[in-house]
Amino acid sequence: DVKVTQSSRYLVKRTGEKVFLECVQDMDHENMFWYRQDPGLGLRLIYFSYDVKMKEKGDIPEGYSVSREKKERFSLILESASTNQTSMYLCASRVDQEKLFFGSGTQLSVL
Amino acid sequence: QQPVQSPQAVILREGEDAVINCSSSKALYSVHWYRQKHGEAPVFLMILLKGGEQKGHEKISASFNEKKQQSSLYLTASQLSYSGTYFCGGGSNYKLTFGKGTLLTVNP
């Protein structure tokens, strides 16, 4: 089975800190995604990547950046965390136009 | 840019049927459906591709009207395990964006 692993299940950070959320997949998928999930707002796409070092902005990229130096790893970076970035963050991967495989999520709290 | 889902919430008794709708203002190459239970990651249900191909759960059916950019998920003879939030996702090229979700509750 495909495994998408997010490094932390829960994370607490202070306002202004630089935060790294890591995601690793083990099935050689080209495409990787970062979503945030907030009550009533569904899953909103932050960034996605269709190849190593290739990235594109999603619908809500402000305040975030990403890095994909290796095919299996896709990192989400909050340069200066703010309280409105408190959320559940979900990473996902897939091959071509096939189904998404999701990680178990990181609940980030910014105090 | 998010697909629009309706209804926002629905409550059923076990054995009843439900339809969840999804529409997009942008042309879609594919429509995805996922179900998420509280505290868990979304789980794949179905993909509907342009041209009529479908891949997914044997017990769940869906349709995709390419001309109208609308999709519907049909849940028949609902079971308690069907409870959860259903998301539709619209795909074009590599991007995949989701609607706000439909909360389905199935009661005994």
Image (cartoon, coloured by chain):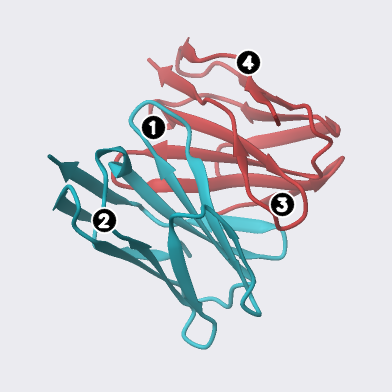
Say which mark, if any, is on residue B37: none
SS assignment at label 2: loop
**Farthest residue toward the bottom?**
B67
**Residue A68 in the figure: left or right of residue A66:** right
**Both labels 3 and 1 in a single chain:** yes
Residue at the spot of label 4 = A7
Q: Tell me where residue A48 appears, x and y as whole percent.
A: 68, 46
Looking at the image, which is closer to me, A45 or B46?
B46
**Both labels 1 and 4 in a single chain:** yes
Q: Earlier in the sequence, mark 4 or mark 3?
A: 4
For the residues carrying marks 2 and 3, which lies nearer the camera in this image?
Answer: 2
Question: Which colour is chain B painted?
Answer: cyan
**Residue A100 in the figure: left or right of residue B23:** right
SS assignment at label 1: helix
**Distance CA(mark 2)–CA(mark 1):** 41 Å
**Screen quadrant of the C terminus of chain A:** top left
For the residue carrying disc 1, how many other residues have a C-alpha within 10 Å: few (<14), some (14-19), or many (20+)? few
For the residues carrying marks 2 and 1, which lies nearer the camera in this image?
Answer: 2
User: Which residue appears at 33% of the width and 30% of the height?
Assistant: B38
Q: Tell me where residue B2 appears, x and y as whole percent.
A: 45, 61
